[in-house]
Image: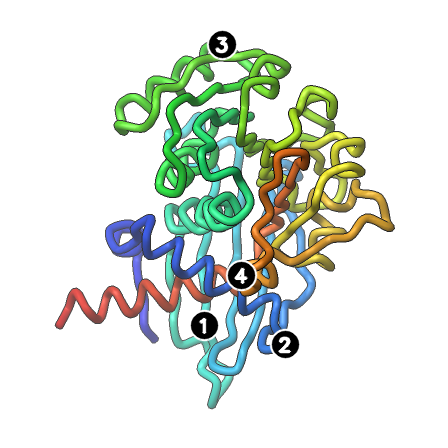
């Protein structure tokens, strides 16, 4: 059995590797080549400790990603989120590769957002509003700074202390400067809005979002989770990683049933389907696909072989 530790995968992953893997996975997910299986949601012996099991296969590989969220880890100085990716030996059905992927998962999720923003957001978008001050929100800023010239980051957080700490983290990482903002102020100024929270209610009002804005909803990955107002989904142009999964556990469970919903991978493969328009709001919902995990894991294994050569 091949094993890649958290330390090794964290050393191997890069923004470029994650972006390329995410783009290839999203295109594949929109084709007939990939089978995406229903997500399993569970919890530990304490109900607040949660995990998900996502699985997929294509013509060359099959595997599983187990993601966990243990909120009490913050008090222990440990990450709240963790992930492990498992590949099956296609001949014998045994697990033949195990990859610890805690940091990789943050890169993978943010990379999907970067792929969508690169396709859907206005080319000159430079003001980013971020709802959330956690680890994933940080990686969203870092990934989007690779695809747009972000000049200003407006940070909407639940506490002044967490928001100040988040802005300081951006500065230490050499990312565009963050500044605390109220939700209405941030939406009114933003050309890109990213939500990366565990919210179960809308974070802002639909009429605060200007035409021409792109919105990425990254937090909804289970029944009842919600970050965006339904009125926004009713008037926006809607994209997601996988329409069926998005309507079941993603942000699009709150979209009108009749609203057209397009897989971003299909749009990426259509050169005439760039999403930005001056009078339109675009929304991308990322509910998280296992094929993204499998493709970034495959890229990590290739990077490991290259480093060892």
Residue 170 picture location, percent across and down: 34, 25
Question: Label for residue 87?
Answer: 1
Question: Label for residue 271?
Answer: 4
Question: Going from the N terminus, do you reach mark 3 or mark 4 first?
Answer: 3
Q: Nearer the viewer, mark 1 or mark 2?
A: 2
Residue 304 picture location, percent across and down: 23, 65
Residue at image location 54% in from the left, 18% down from the top:
157
153 over 68 or under it: above or below: above
Question: Going from the N terminus, do you reach mark 4 or mark 1 first?
Answer: 1
Camera-nearest residue between 48 and 67:
67
Q: CA distance from mark 4 to mark 1?
A: 33 Å
Q: Quadrant of residue 98?
A: bottom left
Q: Nearer the viewer, mark 2 or mark 4?
A: 4
Q: Secondary structure at mark 3?
A: helix
Most extreme residue toward the bottom is 91
Q: CA distance from mark 2 to mark 4?
A: 20 Å
| Horizontal relation, residue 106 to residue 57: left or right | left
Residue at image location 37% in from the left, 68% down from the top:
298
Q: Nearer the viewer, mark 4 or mark 1?
A: 4
Sort mark 3 into few (<14), some (14-19) or many (20+) by Cα contacts within 10 Å.
Answer: few
Sort mark 1 into few (<14), some (14-19) or many (20+) by Cα contacts within 10 Å.
Answer: many
Camera-nearest residue between 84 and 225:
225
Q: Secondary structure at mark 2?
A: loop
Question: Label for residue 32?
Answer: 2
Q: Label 3, on which residue?
A: 160
Q: Secondary structure at mark 4?
A: loop
């Amino acid at each position: 059995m091949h094993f890649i530790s958290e330390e090794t995968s964290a050393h191997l992953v890069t923004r470029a590797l994650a972006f390329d893997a995410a783009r290839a996975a999203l295109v594949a997910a929109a084709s007939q080549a990939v089978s995406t299986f229903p997500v399993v949601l569970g919890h530990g012996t304490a109900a607040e400790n949660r995990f998900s099991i996502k699985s997929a296969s294509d013509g060359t590989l099959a595997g599983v990603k187990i993601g966990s969220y243990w909120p009490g880890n913050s008090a222990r100085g440990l990450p709240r989120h963790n992930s492990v990716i498992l590949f099956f030996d296609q001949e014998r059905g045994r697990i033949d590769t195990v990859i610890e992927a805690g940091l990789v998962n943050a890169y993978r999720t943010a990379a999907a957002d970067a792929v969508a923003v690169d396709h859907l957001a206005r080319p000159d978008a430079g003001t980013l509003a971020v709802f959330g001050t956690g680890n994933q929100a940080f990686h969203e800023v870092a990934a989007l700074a690779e695809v747009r010239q972000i000049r200003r980051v407006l940070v909407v957080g639940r506490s002044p202390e967490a928001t100040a700490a988040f802005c300081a983290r951006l500065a230490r990482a050499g990312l565009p400067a963050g500044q605390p903002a109220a939700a209405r102020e941030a939406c009114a100024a933003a050309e890109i809005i990213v939500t990366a929270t565990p919210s179960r209610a809308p974070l802002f009002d639909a009429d605060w979002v200007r035409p021409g804005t792109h919105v990425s909803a990254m937090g909804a990955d289970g029944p009842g989770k919600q970050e965006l107002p339904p009125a926004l989904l009713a008037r926006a142009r809607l994209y997601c990683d996988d329409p069926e999964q998005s309507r079941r556990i993603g942000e699009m469970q709150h979209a009108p049933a009749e609203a057209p919903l397009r897989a971003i991978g299909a749009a990426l493969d259509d050169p005439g389907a760039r999403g930005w328009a001056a009078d339109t709001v675009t929304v991308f919902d990322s509910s998280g696909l296992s094929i993204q995990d499998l493709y970034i894991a495959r890229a990590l294994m290739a990077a490991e072989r290259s480093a060892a050569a």
